[in-house]
Amino acid sequence: MSTVNRREFLEIAGAGLLIVAAAPLSDAQRGGGAGPLETRLHIGEDGFITVLSGKIEEGQGALTELAMAAAEELRVPLDRVRMVMGDTDQTPNDGGTSGSGTTPRTAPLARRAAATARDLLLAGAGRQFGVDSARLEVRDGVVQYAGKKYGYADLARSPELAAAYHEALPANTMVTPAKDWQILGKPQVRLDTRELITGAHRFPSDIVRPGMLYGRVLRAPSYGAALDRVDLTEAQKMPGVTAVRDGGFVACAAPTTFAARKALAAISATARWKTVEQPSSDALFGYLKQHARPQERPQAQGRGSVDKGLAEARTWLKASYQVAYVQHAPMEPRAAVAEWQNGRLTVWTGTSNPASVRQQLAETFGIAPDRVRVVAPHFGGGFGGKHTAEAAGEAARLAKYAQHPVAVQWTRAEEFMWAYFRPAALIEIEAGLDADNAISAWDFTNYNSGASALDTPYRIPNTRARFIASDPPLRQSSYRVLAATANNFAREAFTDELAATAGRDPLEFRLFHLDNQRMKNVLNAATQRFGWVERRKKRRRGTGIGLACGTEKNSVVAACCEVEVDPASGVPRLIEVVQAFECGAILNPANLRSQVEGAIMMGVGPALREEILFKDGKIANARFATYRVPRFRDLPKLDVILLDRQDLESAGAGETPIITIAPAIANAVFDATGKPVHAMPIGAPRG
Amino acid sequence: MATIRLSVNGKARSVDTEPERPLLEVLREDLGLTGTKYGCGEGQCRACTVLLDGAPTVSCVTAVGAAEGRKIVTIEGLAEGGTLHPVQQAFLDEGAAQCGYCMPGMVLQTVALLANHPKPTDAQIVEGLNGNLCRCSNYHRIMAAVRLAAAATGKKG
């Protein structure tokens, strides 16, 4: 039995709540799908609407988008909507927040729930007035009839409507078409901005509980090192310190971070480790190839016969591309606060997957999942790097031993070394051109990094695109748009090599091979704004221009850029970027613009400089001073074009806009130097 | 342990603690001012920026003892009553926040920048804020917010 109570809910939803979930949600109710209206929407006596979603906010704008979606369908001003997100006791399980899924899958649920509530109000009002409800309409959350006003709170008082509230969302609810939108489609500054710029918002690392201690965990000095022995005596003598060892888990908690750090230093001084040999980044790409597992999980796409296509080609070209390991390095490192009360565990943590973290915690501590509540407050950035439960588990274990709530926030060094990485990639491509200089065969193999955007969007009669897993030397997992960045980098850089071999302009060469009209549209929009055709004619020494396009997650993107290459060092500097992006009907143009601009700039990092270096099981550049993420100085002249396709379903946009910047820069460097680029980061010293 | 007297956001505060503790941790853990953020603990990301006698200072590598007798302004001390500081208002109007974790440091760094350069050039903005990291990389929008803040402050002044 869940213990979320009305009081706790009211703290969040505000006073005067009229409709609450009458019974605690069962896992079946929480588990995906539309579920009954009551799991998604609550109507307050004060007229405020509370929208619930298991999705989380990490800066991508989901909170505002879902609030806008509900306000649109309910015909209420946006400031009448409150959001409750990412709380396993209160919100439906909408799955993890990843894969640009909130816009295409969760926003429609919020719209359907809100439209259902609106229809219920109208139907109830129709019955009450004895008129056809089709003759009534909601404005500002109110139905007017014969000089009287009826709001959602009035609706909720009717027992028959309250009963409808427990039923599953009807599948056929009509939502408002894009052409009639009053709130969606209009630029809206994110609703959480004020709290963020005043410091009022409580990030996971800002949560404070009564009697809370600060925890620190002993980490191995290198990957694969096993703890041989350790002595907790000195740490345990320190005032207020709890030091624990539980198998390989050694940690301490203290009244301040300062005291916890001192206690951990005392523990660490006594620790002895058995280390094992580890691969290094010097030999990374050979290692990935040597450890490839082609027999496992082969993922291949294609058409025609690559062998036949290559055999019949007039010209052949092959190249190998390397993409380094990179770290997400979100501004807020992993953080969690855990509290045990009467055998029930509550954890506040920065995770994009609260339901999965809840399950993991329940398994770790051998308790029923409904004894665990995971709350994910809006956290300080994830980019695909916070799907896991590390800090949550550590805080919960420490809290159990210390019998106090415990906060664990990873240090930056821990985040760099122990968080998972974006996989490195080795990509091999071989292609052939026919007598007309069209691509007739395309053979593409990604080792280690993944199958996203694996297949070519170009019209080629014979293709094979494969992903082959390897034994990765580092812990690796998802990063914004997964392997689509690596695959698009290699494909688009190689496409320029083919265009050069064919003696054709990169834009013309792409348009010739494209059938996807949406891709052509963004290419045309970006190149026209950039002045591609004119600028190809006026070349300046030491500079180059390049373009790239791509598609993933049902959105399309194209970028043009100009670089200047330092003649002495060969290091490129980004001068200008024009990017066009289209993701169907735009829900919040202001947030979309910010997402696209941010994605471009985030992508500049791994394109130009970011590269995790490792040796002897240690990260050699686990600091912001040595692992150089983008800064203000890296800002080019930046122009973003958003194409609004109200006739298409809205696609998510937090990821795809990152996939073009690296190949566009690579192609501009190729243009400037005549030397093709085969590695990300571009022009950074190796090793 | 020592008794350290601090002036924080115009109020006299007193803490009994080790003088070598980072100011960041004392603000957050002893004074409950969690608006100031831990980002790296090495003064390399400026998420922990506060103003010390008006100068932007990385509080993660500043000992609390060294802040004694100086005026500390944190993000919580900028808005007066319900009225946002003009820099905050510009950041709000421009939608400068994505995850927002860097925002307190960005806002305070901008306040200091505009105190020195009321009408900054873009180059001065870049130099002034270059040490402040934003991993959402929303730099373009933050630049626009700083320009807006400068314009708004200029009109008032």
Image (cartoon, coloured by chain):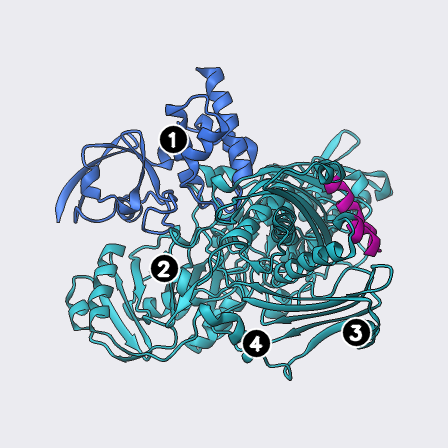
Asked if the residue at tag 4 contacts the one at tag 1, i.e. Cβ–Cβ closer than 8 Å, the answer is no
Of A531 and A106, nearer the camera is A531
* Residue depicted at 60% across the width and 55% down the height: A53
Residue highlighted by disc 4: A289
Left or right of A575, for residue A274: left
Left or right of A307, for residue A299: left
Find the distance from the CA under tag 3 to the CA under tag 4: 22 Å
**Residue A341 visible from this viewpoint:** no
Of A473 and A130, nearer the camera is A473
Kind of residue indicated by mark 4: Lys
Residue highlighted by disc 3: A306
**Residue A35 visible from this viewpoint:** yes
Sooner in the amino-acid sequence: mark 3 or mark 4 = 4
**In this view, the mark in front (1 or 4):** 4
Colour of the chain lettered A: cyan
* Residue depicted at 52% across the width and 44% down the height: A566
Residue highlighted by disc 2: A413
Magenta stretch encompasses residue A511 = yes
Callout 1: SS: loop
Magenta span of residues: A508-527
Callout 2: SS: helix
Q: Chain under label 2? A: A
* Residue depicted at 16% across the width and 64% down the height: A238
Magenta stretch encompasses residue A55 = no
* Residue depicted at 66% across the width and 36% down the height: A187
Residue A654 appears at what percent x and percent y?
A: 62, 51
Asked if the residue at tag 4 contacts the one at tag 3, i.e. Cβ–Cβ closer than 8 Å, the answer is no
Kind of residue indicated by mark 1: Leu
